[in-house]
Image (cartoon, grey):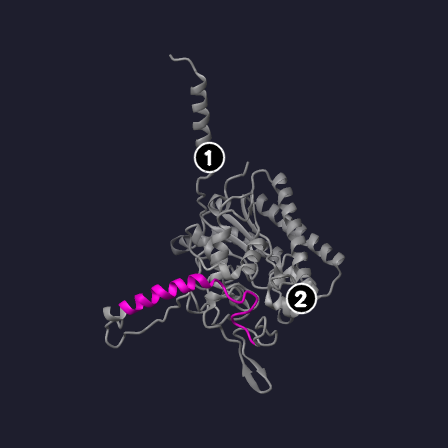
Amino acid sequence: MKPFTRTTYLAFLLVGFASALASSSKRCEFPMIINFGDSTSDTGGISATFFYVPLPYGETYFHRPAGRFSDGRVMLDFIAEGLGLPYLSAYLDSLGTNFSHGVNFATAGSTIRPQNLPFATTGLSPFSLDIQLTQFAQFKSRSQLVAKQGGVFKDLMPKQEYFSRALYTIDIGGNDIGMVFVQNLTDVEIRAIIHDGLRILASSIKSLYDGGARFFWVHNPPPIGCIPSMLVSVPPTADQTDSVGCSIPLNKMVEYFNDELNKTMVQLRKELPLAVLTYVDIYSAKYELISHAAKYAEGRSTIRPQNQSFAISGLYPFSLDIQLPQFAQCKSRSQLVAKQGFEHPLKACCGYGGGKYNFNRSIRCAIPTMVNGTLISAKSCKDPSTRITFDGYHFTEAANKWMFDHIHTGAYSDPPLSLEEACHRHA
């Protein structure tokens, strides 16, 4: 036998390293997603419970109301797509729902801390994080009882073993911060509320962990100081406005929340040794998009379906002589679009009033309002794909797609794990 040389030893080391690297970067196979959150990830909860979310919400992708507060898909939809899973149904939606691949407990207006305030006057959902966890506990046990009935019931429910292998996504906290600002609280009071909220969030994650959850994908709140609705509700003075036009005080408080949230995640990693906790810096990604909107065009669609009908003749209207001029036009316009990026980053697409923000608190997107005897409703802009903000609160589908394209790689995550690697513990 040949002696075990230094070269052989190094070769073994390299092979071992390569094997470990390949293992650590292996794509995770999450069988389901379990989501907790607010309107940024609501896929029909509020729509099923309180009020119908009408067009133009849903117009771009679904071409119908889809329970989402965007013109199309929300980021949770893109996360599901990225993992090869169907879109998630809301837990509160009882019609035609399929929970075999996941469930969504998010509702618009949800907060981490229970608010105990009426939804009709505040817009805050009664389904705060603690209620969403209670709903999850019921779903976890009752779904298995339903599955035991067999047949279609079994097909529509997740398997028991899926719960420990699922990706648990958490996207909540923005409403907590927004509410304290409109209540005119002091910085000391706001910080105390933030710490109480993070205590509840940490306790919620521990509870999920104790129940078998292992893989967590946690979003921090966005820069609410760049949201038209907040800029109108809590208008900053000139010296409180940054170079982008965002409110410095509002964003400073969100940054404080996010710093403390990151510390909370670090501590949870110590306390929950089997958990994989990925902290996703949504704030930085969104601020990057808003502050450099004009240069970003990739990842957004600008051609809206026309749904032309040919029912009468059965002949498609676009013969070859029509298709060639269309190609020439597409070729030139596509290059023009590629140079445009997003427009008016602080201006709502579906809003009323024009001006810097095109937002009026009394005349909201898709909600007809009587003003001086005239029924007025904010309408969608011509091309939502050129805008970042859809209704003054939420992102357009194009902006959500841009966000997903930039966060799923791990570039904005701590540890820097991609979505597809979020089951691997970072050394």
Q: Looking at the image, is mark 1 or mark 2 nearer the viewer?
A: 1
Residue 217 screen position, x and y as percent: 54, 49
- Where residue 242 sits, quadrant-wise, is bottom right
Residue 48 screen position, x and y as percent: 51, 66
Q: Quadrant of the C terminus?
A: top right
Give, as a single range, the part of the protein colored magenta: 324-352
* Residue in the foreground of this view, choosing between 373 and 408: 408
How many labels, in total? 2
For disc 2, the marked residue is: 117
Q: Is residue 282 above or below residue 183?
A: above
* Residue in the foreground of this view, choosing between 43 and 69: 69
Q: Residue at x 53, y 44 (%)?
A: 416
Q: How dense is the environment of label 1, judged by Cα within 10 Å: few (below 14), some, or many (20 and up)?
A: few
Q: Which mark is residue 21?
A: 1
Is residue 198 rendered magenta in the image?
A: no
Is residue 349 rendered magenta in the image?
A: yes
Tag 2: amino acid: Leu
Q: Is residue 351 above or below residue 112?
A: below
